[in-house]
Amino acid sequence: LHRLAMCFVSSVLACISLVHGDAAHARPFDDIKKDGRIIVATEGQFAPFNYFQGSRLTGFEVDIAEAMAQRMGVKIEWKALSFDALLAGLRQDRWDMVIASHGITEERSRAVTFSNPHYCSGGIIVSKGEGVRTVKDLSGKVVAVQIGSTYFDNVKKTTEAREVKTFPQDSDARAALITGRVDAWVTDRFVAKAALEANRASGMQLGDMVFVERIASAVAKGNGSVASEINKALAAIQADGTYDAISRKWFGEDIRCK
Ligand code: LYS
C-alpha cells in the first residue's frame, strides 16, 4: 500500500522502477520501529521449528522471534510461505526478516544478510530397518530431501547416493520414507527426533549426521540496522534465560551454538 501511494506522488519513471523492484529498498530499523510492527516470514511446515497447530503458527522459532521482537519493542506480523519463496521475498522488500531454519551458506550469503545463529544443528540420516545408517551406507541408495535445502547440497556432495529425490516440503520427503518409496530421508536432527516420536509405529530410525550447520534468520542484503537489532535482541534473550527456557520447552535442552 505504501509503495502504491509512493507511485502516485512520484514520477512515472520512479513508479515503474518501484513496480519492477529496482528501487525496492529494505526498511531500516527506524522505519520498522516507527511503524511498530516487523513483518516476519517463515515456512510453517517444519515442526518443531515453525509449523501450524490448526490455524495457529507455533514452534521454537516462532517463540524465539516473538521474544526477540518484544526486546526490539515491535509486534510481529507473520507471513507463511513456501520455503523457496522466503529469501527471494527479502530482495523484493516483501518482508523485513525471515526465520525458517536457514543454514548459513556462502551461496545464500551472497543474496541476503544473515544475523547471528539462533541454533546449531545439522542433517541426519533417517531410514527404516537396518542397513542404512552411515554416509557410506547411502552409496547406491535413493535419498529423499526437501528441495532448496542444505540437505540436498550436502547429500549430493558427501554421499554416493544413486538418486537424490527432492520434495516441495520436508514432510513430503518424510512420507516418501514411511511409505517405502526411498531408502533414506535426510533432514534436521531435531526435526527427525520429533518425527520419530510422533510416528513410533513407522519403523523409522536415526542414523549418522551428514553435516553440521549454523541456523540464522536473514534480512535483505545489506540491511545492517535490522540485522544488528536482531543480534542485540538475540544476545539479550540468551543472556537473561528466556532463550534457555524456550529451548528447553521444545527440545528438553539448550540448542544454541556453543
Ligand atoms: N536447515 C536446512 C536449510 O538450511 C533446512 C531448512 C528446511 C526448512 N524446511 O536448508
Image (cartoon, grey):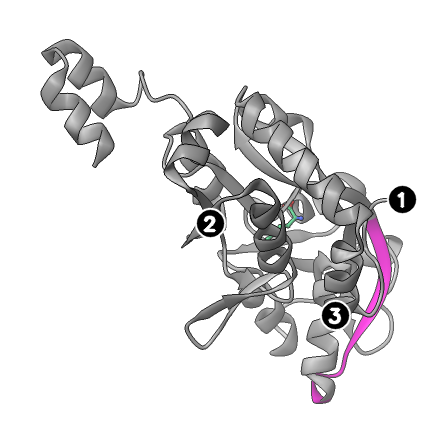
Name the residue located 68 percent from the left edge and 81 percent from the top edge: 198
Question: Which callout, 2 or 1, points at the residue further toward the start of the chain?
Answer: 2
Q: Is residue 154 visible?
A: no
SS category of the residue bearing label 1: loop
Is 143 or 71 nearer to us in this picture?
71
What x and y, as percent, mark residue 8?
10, 22
Q: Is residue 170 left or right of residue 132?
A: left
What x and y, as percent, mark residue 252?
82, 70
Is 180 or 94 nearer to us in this picture?
94
SS category of the residue bearing label 2: strand
Q: How many marks?
A: 3
What amino acid type should be assigned to the residue bearing mark 3?
Lys
Q: Is residue 96 above or below residue 254?
A: above
Gap in angstroms between the C-alphas marked 2 and 1: 29 Å
What amino acid type should be assigned to the residue bearing mark 1?
Lys
168 inside magenta stretch: no
Q: Which residue is mark 1?
A: 258
Instruction: Name the quadrant containing residue 222.
Output: top right
Give the mark toward the camera: 3 or 1.
3
